[in-house]
Image: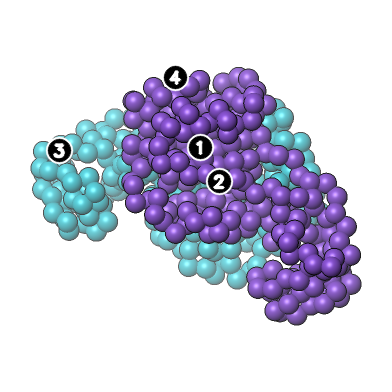
Chain colours: A cyan, B purple
Amino acid sequence: MNLILFAQGELKDEVLSLEGERAAHIAGVLRAAVGDRLRVGQIDGPLGTARVRRVSDVLVELDELELGETPPEQPIDLLLALPRPKVLARLLSPIAQLGVRRIYLSGAWKVERFYFDAHVLAPEAMRVHLLEGLAQVKDTRVPEVSIHRSLTFLVRDELNALLPPETERLVCDPRAALLEQTPRVAKHTLLAFGPEGGFTEREDRLFAEHAFVPVGLGERTLRSDVAVLAALARAHAR
Amino acid sequence: MNLILFAQGELKDEVLSLEGERAAHIAGVLRAAVGDRLRVGQIDGPLGTARVRRVSDVLVELDELELGETPPEQPIDLLLALPRPKVLARLLSPIAQLGVRRIYLSGAWKVERFYFDAHVLAPEAMRVHLLEGLAQVKDTRVPEVSIHRSLTFLVRDELNALLPPETERLVCDPRAALLEQTPRVAKHTLLAFGPEGGFTEREDRLFAEHAFVPVGLGERTLRSDVAVLAALARAHAR
């Protein structure tokens, strides 16, 4: 936890009262003492520092908040054919660390329908993982996550309204030219990622009809969680 | 498991007898029948196919092996300040998937000494993870792993003999220019990666004195396992 994240609503009379994990971290790991200043971030808001006013393992109070800049919006949206729940749970913090503006979790022909019933898809469950990733990299902007049972409906009818105005659309495809060989044509990128076993031909056509450019990641068929992180790291570096 | 890996010694009278996990995979996941041909790879040797001669959950026999090319050697060596055992265990398969020729696990000022006693450092324990990664990406070359308690001794006295003749040396450093902005000056790359908390100034000097060029990965301080995978993916794409 390189940053103590808090929600605006937690600030009362200019004092931030923290319990649970954050209090335990401040007391046990940071070993903060009264008067120390800690790095804090208001969720979806500015970064800053605050003064320790009171500290124990179960309750920490911070005051004298000094807030500055809000971190910039990330230049990538990620469309993921819904991975199996365990994989999704493992991916959310690393995805938040690498940085995305928004995550679209979508159905696809090869996505098992019961994945949509998984506990990890509950907004509060996803949020825990996302906040953990943000605290690691000192970011405050929580990626928005939306769930779409129908890939066709998402791509055909919903995406235009959900993406920033100028967005290039890429879809990972093992047969395509490497991501790095694909010229970047817009500031914002949507990167789409298939399920284990890939998208079907029909889905490939859907993407092609909606201006997605296929991009490759190389010859090695990475396990899907590794592939998503590698693709995201490379898309950021491109 | 996209490839059934076997050791040369397992081939007897041109028949490959497999038990345990591989037999269960062939019978239960691939649902192979007698006469089917499966993709096989001889560890550190050629890729090919073999015919199912007999199949049950506990014993599979393959024969009529047809072996072809051995996959190329990977162009990257990875020097890792020894991560905590849990993290190392989680990293080995993804590292093998992304592809490295050799892994140097090294001590460093901020590496806890007791990490060196961890079970995961046993060669047979590491091999299980590495083979799993190779089977995923259809490679047969097991990265060599060596353990070095002293970073100084490794960098000063051992590396020259262990690296391929023309190797550029990079060390990840959050303050440095991005990896992608660093021109590639040799076919083979050694990428060095610090412990949580980074290398010390003295270690930085050791690297500088031995021709390591510092390279950055961007402003976000990724968790060390995510950082290693992101760096490796980006080094391969560079």
Determine if residue A94 is in view.
Answer: yes
Q: Disc 2 versus disc 1: distance between alpha carbons?
A: 10 Å
Amino acid on which the number 4 mark rests in the picture: Glu
Position above or below: A161 against B157: below
Q: Same chain for the residues at labels 4 and 2, yes or no?
A: yes
Q: Same chain for the residues at labels 2 and 3, yes or no?
A: no
Of B147 and B204, nearer the camera is: B147
Q: Position of residue B108 (x, y in %)?
A: 38, 37
Tell me the subunit letter for badge 2: B
Amino acid on which the number 2 mark rests in the picture: Val
Q: Same chain for the residues at labels 3 and 4, yes or no?
A: no
Q: Earlier in the sequence, mark 4 or mark 2?
A: 2
Q: Earlier in the sequence, mark 4 or mark 1?
A: 1
Amino acid on which the number 3 mark rests in the picture: Asp
Q: Label 2: which residue?
A: B145
Determine if residue A105 is in view.
Answer: no
Disc 4 + disc 1, Cβ < 8 Å = no
* Residue displayed at 58% across by 50% down: B94
* Residue displayed at 23% across by 35% down: A49
Q: Quadrant of residue B51?
A: bottom right
Q: Label 1: which residue?
A: B79
Q: Disc 1 versus disc 3: distance between alpha carbons?
A: 37 Å
Q: Position of residue A231 (x, y in %)?
A: 61, 42
Position above or below: A25 against B7: above
Single out the mark in the foreground, 2 or 1: 2
